[in-house]
Amino acid sequence: MRLRQERLWKRKSSERISLPVTLSSLDPVTTLKGVGKATAEQFQKLGIETIEDLILTFPYRHEDFRIKDLAATPHNEKVTVEGRVESEPSVLFVGKNRSRLQVRLLVGNHLIKAVFFNQHYLKERLEIGMIVTIAGKWDRGRQVINVSNFSEGPKTSQNDFEPVYSLKGVMHQKTFRKYMRIALDTTAHELQDPIPSDIQTAYKLPPLSDALELIHFPTSLQDVKQARRRFVYEELLKFQLKMVGMKKVRKDRDPGTVIPYDINKLKTFIAALPFELTNAQKKVVNEICAELKSPTRMNRLLQGDVGSGKTVVAAIALYAAVTGGFQGALMAPTEILAEQHAESLSAWFQPLGVNIAFLSGSTKGKMRRIILEQLEAGEIDILIGTHALIQPEVTFRKLGLVITDEQHRFGVEQRRVLRDKGISPDVLFMTATPIPRTLAITAFGEMDVSILDEMPAGRKKVQTFWLKESSILPVLRKMEKELHAGRQAYVICPLIEESDKLDVQNAVDVHAQLTAHFAGRYKIGLMHGRLHADEKDEIMRDFSEGKINCLVSTTVVEVGVNVPNATFMLIYDATRFGLAQLHQLRGRVGRGADQSFCVLLADPKNEEGKERMQSMTETNDGFVLAEKDLELRGAGEFFGRRQSGLPEFKMADLVHDFRALDTARHDAERLLEMPAFWEEPEYAQLRDYLQASGALSGERID
C-alpha cells in the first residue's frame, strides 16, 4: 500500500485522474470512467466482467525499452537505441497497401539501417541530422533494425518497462493500460490479500496492492520479478491447499479396509520367484503392504519405467489381499495386455492354489455366466480383465484391492465404478509413462506416489541410433538381418494414410513398400487406430505368436504389449513424437535376452528437434527423458493439454517454478494442521478458497 501511494504521489499532477472512491472491485467494468458499451463488449471477449477480473489479468511479458549498446546485443534480440539520421529515407512500395521505408542511422559508432514497414508517411518527417529513438529486432549480421516502435528526439520516457497483454479484437495495448490504471487507482486498496502477513514477511513478498502496481506498471526489472514471485507463490499455495486438503479429507472421511495378510506366505511367494526383486521393487512392496494393513484407504500411483517390473509388484499386492481373505481385481486397457497379465499371474500363482479368472468383452455365454457366479460366491480370488470388469452384473463377494494398469487410458468414471464394487477397497494405479516429480505431485497431488526407478539385473539396454532419412537402405539391411535370425521387428509411422498437409511417412504406404521389398520372404502386418479393437487384438496376437515377422503400425503399440522376440524398431519421422512417447515406443523392444536396436529416422529442422534425437541416443532412463521432455515442451504439451487434468495457472510455470511448488506444498501441509488456520480472520480468504474448490467436500474441481 505504501509503495503504491508513493508511486502515485510521484506522478505529475496533470496525469492524475480525479475519480470517485466508492467503486468496489466486484463492480462491473462499465462503472469505470470512459467504459462505454463498445469497450465493455471488448472486455467481455477477454472474459473480463468485473473490475477485479481486469486487475487480475496479468501481462504475459514486459517490453524492455532501456537504451542498449548494439555491440553487446545478441543477434535477433529486441533493442532500443537512440540515433542520428544520416541519409535521406527511401521508400519501396509493394502492391497497393504495403511499403518498406529504409534510412541510415548513426548509433554510437555503428552506422546501421533502420527499416519501417507500412510507414511510408515517415519519409516527410525524417530529416538528416535529427535524433530519433527506435525499438525493434536487431539483425546483427546485416546491421539492420526492423523497427516496431519509433519516436522523434532522444528517449524521454521514464517508463522503461511496458506490460504487454494477450488481447483480442480491436482492444489496443494503450487503451487497456489506461483502464488498468484507472482500475488500480480506484479499487486496488480494497482487495483482500489472501496471503497471511507472517508468510509475506518470511518470504519477503510484497502485499497484494503493491504487487499489482509492480506487475502492471513496473519501473525496473526487479519490480517485475518481485511481483511475479508473489503471484506464483499465491497460485501454487492455493493449488497445494486444495490437493493436500483433498488428501486429508479422503483419509479422514474414507476409512479403508484392513487387510490382515499373511506375511509368511508372502515371503515364501517372493522367495519362489525365478528372479530377485530390485531394491526399488522391495521399497514399493513395503509401501503398499503397509497401507494394506492400515485402516486408511490406499490411493496410490505406481509409476515405473518400461520393463522395471510393475507386474510382479501388482502380483505381490494381489496375493497379499488373497492371503488376508479378500478378492483382487486387475483392469487393463486392452484385451491382449489383460491376457498377458493373466498368463503371468497364473504361472506364478498356480502352485499356490490361487483361483484366477479372465473376463473381457469376448468372454461369452456359459463361460461368462460361470465366472460371474463364482466371483459373487467368492470362489474366484483374482479377476483380471478389460472394461468388462466395470459392467453392472460383475459382483464381487469381498473385494479388497483394485489395480488399474495404464490408468491414464481409463476415464475417472470408469476407475470409480470398479472401485465402488467393493466396500472401501484399497486402490493402486499403475503407469509405464515416467512422470517428472513436479508433474506427479501436481497432476496426482491427492495420491501417494511410488516410483520404480531401477531396472532388473542383466537386462540389456536397447541400442539407439539417430540417422537421416536418406539412410533407409542400410537400416532395412540391418532389419532383414534380425528377421533372418528368427527375430521380429516393429516399424512405426506417425500417420495412417498419406496427407496433403504433412510430408511424413504413413503406415499404409510403408506397409506396401516393405511387402514389396521383402517379396514374400517375411510376413508384414499392418495395425492402426482405425481398426476395430477385435482386429487389433488379433493382429497383436499373431505378432506375439510369431505369425507376423514385421509389424508396421502407428503409435497404438505404445502401451504394454510384451513380445520378447521383437528386437528391432524403426521409427519414421521421429521428430513428430515427444521424448516420452519415443521412449514408450522403444520399450516395445529389449524385452528378451537378445540385444535390441531402435533406429530413429529424422531430419530435424530446429535445435529442439536435434536435442530430442540426441537425448534418445544418450540415455535409456525414462525419468531423465521425461524431465527433458517437460523442459522442452512444457507441462501442457507433455500430458496433452485437454486431458492432462493440470491446472491453468496465470503466472506459475511447473517447470521453472518447481522450488516454489515444493515450498507451497510444505506450507499447505503446515497450514492445514494449524488450529489458527481454521479460526483466525487472517486465514479467511484461504479458507473460503478451499471451501469453494470442493476439496473439503471430497469433490475435485479443477
Image (cartoon, rainbow, N blue to C red):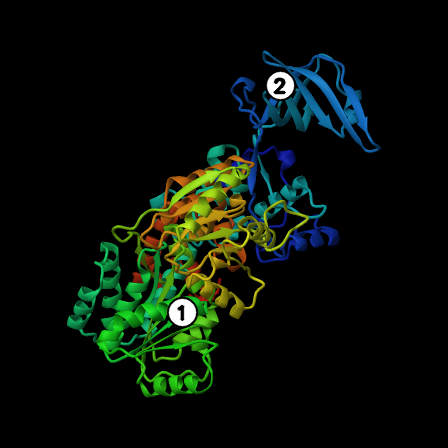
Which residue: 22% across, 64% down? Answer: 273
Whole-percent x, y for residue 606 in the image:
54, 36
Q: To which residue does mark 2 refer?
A: 143
Q: Is residue 46 visible?
A: yes
3D distance between C-alphas at marks 1 and 2: 64 Å
Left or right for 246, reference 477 = left
Left or right for 688, reference 175: left
The amino acid at mark 2 is: Gln
User: Which one is nearer the viewer's eye here, 4 or 557?
Assistant: 557
In this view, which residue lies farthest toward the right? 96
| Residue 243 falls in image quadrant | bottom left
As rendered, which of 300 and 468 lies closer to the eye?
Answer: 468
- Which of the 4 quarters of the picture holds residue 656? top left
Residue 693 at x, y = what percent? Answer: 46, 64
Q: Secondary structure at mark 1?
A: helix
Where is mark 1, residue-wise?
Answer: 338
Q: Can residue 206 be seen at all in this image of the molecule?
A: no
Above or below, 41 relative to 165? below
Outermost residue on the left side: it is 264
Residue at image point 52% right, 52% down? 190
Classify mark 2: residues with Cα within 10 Å, few (<14), some (14-19) or many (20+): some
Place of residue 412 in the rendered image (x, y in percent of width and height, measured from the top left): 46, 68
Please determine whether, in this image, residue 274 is positioned above or below residue 186.
below
Q: Secondary structure under badge 2?
A: loop
243 displayed left or right of 551: left
